[in-house]
Amino acid sequence: MITAEALSEIIRADAPLAPMTSFGIGGIARQFVQPRSLYELAAVIGYFRETGTPCRLLGGGTNLLIRSAEIAEPVVHFGKMRAIRFDGTTVHAEAGAPLGRLVTECGAVGLAGTEALAGVPGTVGGAAVMNAGGKHGYFGGMVKGVTVVDGDGTQFLDGSKIEFGYRGSSLRGRAVAGVTLALQTGEPDEIARKRRDILSEKKISQPLKARSAGCVFRNPRGHQAGRLIDEAGLKGARAGGAMVSPLHANFIVNAGGASADDVLRLIERIQKIISKKHNLALELEIEIW
């Protein structure tokens, strides 16, 4: 049982969430919880489940738009759980470890595979839940297993039992505490070269330095959302401080002082235009609180 003193060390009230998201947009969390270990995470999740208190799980905030209102449910943030440990070709990473750091450190010790995720923002836990990746490879293909926490405690899920799909997995809604990856050996210099090449490619086509939540819409079957939006002449379209990126039309960026309402108005405008032109419903890839 976690002590009241320990609990007070990891909970704070009225925490601003905008700095916790790549959009730089968000309201206030009435309760903001930052477990520092698997033990503390299990104790917190167990307490919330035992008391019937719904909570929200926050990783890197890179695929998320948070409205400006107060968040009544406790927000559990994984930012203090960042450890990465190597055991031969096996890598154990806590959920809050930045994905970019994982990619760099794996390459430095001669473990190949994660360089396919170069330039993908977020954390290890979020990468598992969302099956992060693209044409160079997906996170799910490297997963040996995942440690999750729920009302019954902590359990390890074998990777073969987890369903990974396009922009999602069967882990959605679960508290992922850590991920175990099975990688291959490689030459550090060659891995670094591949990582640089992938990053260079993305810098040309994606607004990596802008405040955004990555691709806003899922690709409809047989189509590319970005291309549809571009062909509709919507690059550069604005709603308040929110703007469709001139570099990649499936990115909405915070061009300065954007509110959640600005982003939502722009999303609605895009969806209406694409629906009218192509009779297609653009589904959101980002999550909205």
Image (tube, rainbow, N blue to C red):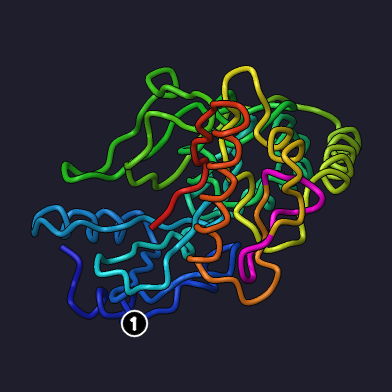
Foreground of the two, 78 or 63: 63
Position of 243 relative to 269 (above/below)? below
Report the residue marked by disc 1: 14
Q: Secondary structure at mark 1?
A: strand
Foreground of the two, 222 or 24: 222
| Rendered location of residue 67, percent (x, y) | 42, 66
Foreground of the two, 243 or 38: 243
- Where the N terminus falls, by quadrant? bottom left
Which region of the structure is painted magenta?
A: 238-250
Q: Is residue 239 magenta?
A: yes
In the image, what residue occupies the spot 20% across and 56% down? 54
Residue 245 in sight: yes
What residue occupies the far left of the structure in this picture? 51
In the image, what residue occupies the spot 67% across and 60% down? 253
Position of 222 relative to 244 (above/below)? above
In the image, what residue occupies the spot 68% across and 26% down? 137
Instruction: Name the main secondary structure of what is drawn in magenta.
Output: loop
